[in-house]
Amino acid sequence: MTVLPMWNEAGAKWTFQGNGRLITASAITVRGILNHVMENLDEEDGRAVIPLGQGDPSTFPCFRTALVAEDAVVDAVRSAEFNCYAPTVGILPARRAIADHLSRDLPYKLSPDDVYLTIGGTQAIEVVVTALARPGANILLPRPGYPCYVARAALCGLEVRYFDLLPDKGWEVDLERVEDLADANTVAMVMINPGNPCGTVFSYQHLKEIAETARKLGIMVIADEVYDHLAFRDTPFVPMGVFASITPVLTVGSLSKRWIVPGWRLGWVATNDPNGFLKDTGVVESIVGFLNVSPDPATFVQAAIPRILERTGKEFFSKVLCMLREASDICYDKIREMPCLVCPKKPEGSMFAMVKLDSSLLEDIEDDLDFCVKLAREESVVVLPGIALGMKNWLRITFAVEPSSLQDGLERMKAFCQRHVKK
Ligand SMILES: *Cc1c(COP(=O)(O)O)cnc(C)c1O
């Protein structure tokens, strides 16, 4: 940080300085760490950079969104009816469409009043974390997890406690640890399903156990379901809201992943609360309070929501699932050809595989960050080091990439590992 002179020319004392919390918070985001890895890319390397770090397949033509979704946005713009500000919580037709869309998988019906539109899933996380961050409170987060929760909690002074996802148990939640961690000031536990970074899809039974544990502890569940329905093997996606009669659930959702349009910045928070606990505790009031002082998603994107949700065809979704399944097969099989990497569980959903790095088999590679920095420099392949997710000596690889690029990237990674293997 720059140290300012004590006194300015007008003779007044300079009193401002940067907010240190922001500097700490941004250091632990995926973007912050990937930027650091990418600073090491070699501009002289004539080959294309292969991005296996961030999960954003939208840049590949084969992952283009549905035509009906594009048309819905274009028509909303052309109508000139949505150049206005939107209401705090979002426009009613969009909230109704999301409520109906989510209710299809629930044993009760959500009302439009249960849905709050946000600027992507990222702002939905900001909403729920901030709404719960009363002084002295703490929140339970999964490790490995999604660093945005950590950063957001740091920004609003909410204490974070970690429970583990267990690689030997298919990355299921260590529920005993959850019980040990919680105390009277614990407000919620976060779960991400389908999982980022592990590519897991939790079973109905495990989700029920999570809800029952939360009930026992008197806390709610924040269910990050931005990868909802991106489950491409045998385990079906079950929304946590199914168990909301056991304990209240705040669902974080987004168009970004399932429709592959992260740039459209449209997400939501849904309150799954058939017993009405959240209203009594002021959580709903806090959510609205937060939204009252923050900007809204673009009104024309909100206006496009009903058509996007109601008309996107089954073929689009099955095509995406099919591509993700094939890509995850390629990824899993190739990783098995690299002795220094172990993937404890074949991905069943989302866009990621979590892979353990055994750096003792490699020469001159210290740890996961060193691996990623040198891989970027030597092979122009970008992978996320596990430290970004609280897991040293692990790597997160996204397979949501055009298949030929994925093949190419993994081949380069294999060549890198072979070159660095201890003789
Ligand atoms: C991508 C992602 C988000 C953020 O969603 P956006 O709509 O892109 O803001 C939230 N949670 C998880 C687990 C994600 O992977």
Image: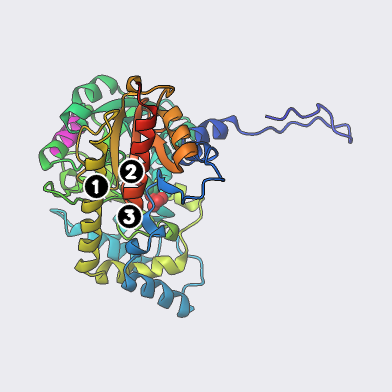
| Residue at which label 3 appears | 404
Q: Earlier in the sequence, mark 3 or mark 1?
A: 1
Identify which amino acid the numbered label 1 is placed on.
Ile
Work out whether 398 lies above or below 385. Answer: below
Identify which amino acid the numbered label 3 is placed on.
Ser
Asked if the residues shown at circle 3 and circle 2 are in contact, with their CB atoms under 8 angstroms apart, the answer is no
| Residue at which label 2 appears | 410
Tell me, what colour scheme is on the image?
rainbow
Residue 247: in magenta span = no
> Could you say where residue 54 lies in the image, as x and y percent from the top left?
40, 46
Count the marks: 3
Work out whether 226 lies above or below 421. Answer: below
Quarter containing the N terminus: top right
Secondary structure mostly taken by the magenta-highlighted segment of the chain: helix
| Residue at which label 1 appears | 330
> How many neighbours does mark 2 have within 10 angstroms: few (below 14), some (14-19), or many (20 or more)?
many
Q: Earlier in the sequence, mark 3 or mark 2?
A: 3
> Could you say where residue 286 lies in the image, as x and y percent from the top left?
41, 44
Residue extent of the magenta highlight: 208-216
Work out whether 380 lies above or below 63. Answer: above
Q: Residue at x 32, y 22 (%)?
A: 361
- Residue extending furthest front? 423
Compare residues 12 and 147 and report the one nearer the observer: 147
> How many neighbours does mark 3 have within 10 angstroms: few (below 14), some (14-19), or many (20 or more)?
few
Q: Residue at x 18, y 36 (%)?
A: 211
Q: CA distance from mark 3 to mark 1?
A: 10 Å
Query: Which secondary structure lies at badge 2?
Result: helix
Q: Earlier in the sequence, mark 1 or mark 2?
A: 1
Query: Which secondary structure lies at badge 1?
Result: helix
Compare residues 309 and 99 and report the one nearer the observer: 309
